[in-house]
Image (spheres, rainbow, N blue to C red):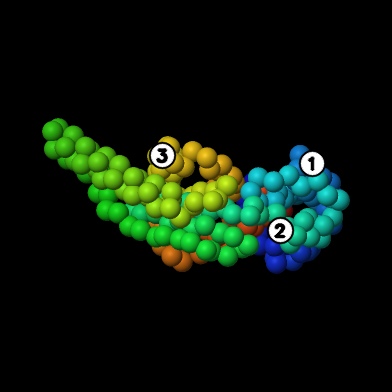
Amino acid sequence: MTEVLVPPARWSRWVANFAASHGDPELRVDGGALRGAAPDGSWFTARLPFDLAYDGPAQADALAGALAEGVAPAAWGVLLVRKGGFAIARVEVGAIVASKVGQRHVQGRTKAGGQSQQRFARRRANQARVAYEAAADHAHAVLSGASVVVAGGDRTAVDEVLTDSRLRSLSVVGPWLAVPDPRRAVLDRAVLDAQALVVTVENAGPARE
């Protein structure tokens, strides 16, 4: 079982490829998602982004239509944090209207032992704290007016940033975005991925999705 992000423009082709590989799926709406079950035992579940529930007809094009109608909040954000840096964007009407990308040096792990290791661990923890505080400062500025945020990177790092009292009004919604050290290109890709259908698929046989 795998999870993939399918852009709206590719959804019809994705379903067609699934059917070509496994047979025409029987579609039904289940738990706010569109579920397709193929004759060979393969299945998929497609969910709208932003943790929104789908309650339309059991048709693939209807799900794509619901997405095309605009399910995104009026203002939302992307927050990517790793120990190597952060990338933040506020999005309105599908376009980035404010953003900030930054890098902060946090030392890697050491094999040293004893007091040297303890001093290194304290230094590393202090560097991480400063990096997270900087990310929180920029998140407060960039995400002003956003109601929800799609997050990614390192979960512990994201959680640390979101403990800032200025960011507690933000609701974190799916999907979680697995990204490398945040850079501008990574942020641009994350904004697109955040608006994609979240598809869980189980292939009973060879697939070409």
Residue indicated by mark 1: 30
- Residue plotted at (46% across, 66% down): 185
In the rendered structure, the answer to whether residue 154 lies left or right of residue 1 reads: left
Residue indicated by mark 2: 70
SS for tag 1?
A: strand
As drawn, the label of residue 164 is 3
Mark with earlier residue (3, 2): 2
Q: Amino acid at mark 1?
A: Asp
Question: Quadrant location of the C terminus?
Answer: bottom right
The answer for how far apart the CA atoms under marks 1 and 2 are is 21 Å
Neighbour class for label 1 at 10 Å: few (<14), some, many (≥20)? some
Numbered disc in front, either 3 or 1: 3
Q: Are marks 3 and 2 in contact (CB under 8 Å)?
A: no
Mark with earlier residue (3, 1): 1
- Residue plotted at (27% across, 49% down): 106
Whether residue 56 is visible here, answered yes or no, is yes
Numbered disc in front, either 1 or 2: 2
